[in-house]
Image (cartoon, rainbow, N blue to C red):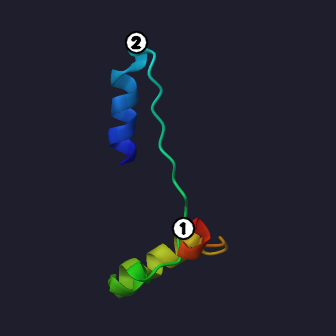
Amino acid sequence: MNAFTESLRQELLGERVRVSVVQPGAVDTELVNHLSDTVRDAARRRIDGMEALRPSWAC
């Protein structure tokens, strides 16, 4: 998504159109339960120390 957004931003530079992407950060979902052990451990190390958003906070 980031690469698409950046390419779109560059394409529209001369058209006075702003393009942005919002990244909420780590979200506490069951997704990590479906990852392999190696990938899950790497993901957890990457977000270690961050407070993950809870899906209910989006309401």
Residue 5 location, quadrant: top left
Residue 30 location, quadrant: bottom left
Farthest front residue?
Answer: 59
- In the image, residue 50 sits, relative to residue 16, either above or below, namely below
**Can see residue 17?**
yes
Tell me the element at label 2.
Answer: helix
- Numbered label attached to residue 14: 2
- Packing grade of label 1 (10 A; few <14, some 14-19, many >=20) is some
- Numbered label attached to residue 26: 1
Q: Would residue 58 appear left or right of 8 to someone viewing this image?
A: right
**Can see residue 54?**
no
What residue is rendered at 39% in x and 14% in y? Answer: 15
Please provide percent x and percent y for residue 55.
53, 73
What residue is rendered at 37% in x and 21% in y? Answer: 12
Please provide percent x and percent y for residue 10.
38, 24
Q: Would residue 1 appear left or right of 52 to someone viewing this image?
A: left
Q: Would residue 25 appear left or right of 11 to someone viewing this image?
A: right
Sequence-first tag of 1 and 2: 2
**Amino acid type, residue under disc 1 in the picture:** Ala
Residue 49 location, quadrant: bottom right
- Residue closest to the eye, 59 or 36: 59
